[in-house]
Amino acid sequence: MTITTQQISQLQTICSGKFRDREERLEAISEMMGCEINSIKDLNQLQASELIHFFNTGKTMDHSSWGFFDKRNNQHKNVLSICHTLGWVSEENPQFVDLHRLGGWLKSDRSPVKKPLKEMSSTEVSKIIFALQNIVKSKFK
């Protein structure tokens, strides 16, 4: 979903006190988002909400709950395996998948299904697996 006019207004108000000019603001936001942002209007609602939350609290939003999985579900185990292949692992303990990163990806526009992993049907998890496998293919070309 595209950013709302209220979110645009909020971000412009917040950023006017934090950055000297538009270029500095867009450069900082691009760095935070991990992709080039040419205008605040390039953000989606989720990204805008996260930025507003960060600028107001100084804390990033936690996406871990979206990555929670059922250890008895073979499809979920497959998702975790692919995350290991991609290097989406915890910095503290590389044996564990970084659920914050997985959850953030599930919430992003790159995910074919935008809902928590545990709430997905087997068909929806199959779509997630296919998308993650394509990321692996493009990463190791």
Image (cartoon, helix red, strand yellow):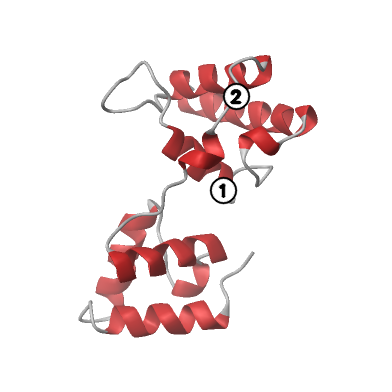
Q: Is residue 117 left or right of residue 35?
A: right
Residue 73, given in percent of the width and then of the height, sits at: 67, 17
For image coordinates 50% across by 65% down, the residue present is 43
Label 2 vs 1, first from the N-terminus = 1
Q: Secondary structure at mark 1?
A: helix
The quadrant in which residue 45 appears is bottom right
- What amino acid is labelled 2 in the image? Gln
Q: Quadrant of the N terminus?
A: bottom right
For image coordinates 63% across by 32% down, the residue present is 131
- What amino acid is labelled 1 in the image? Lys
- In the image, 58 versus 86, the foreground residue is 58
Residue at numbered disc 1: 107
- In the image, 32 versus 66, the foreground residue is 66
Q: Secondary structure at mark 2?
A: helix
User: Few, some or many C-alpha atoms within 10 Å of disc 1 (few <14, some 14-19, many ≥20)?
Assistant: many
Residues at badges 2 and 1 in contact (C-beta under 8 Å)? no
Marker disc for residue 90 = none
Residue at numbered disc 2: 133
Image height of 80 relative to 4, above or below: above
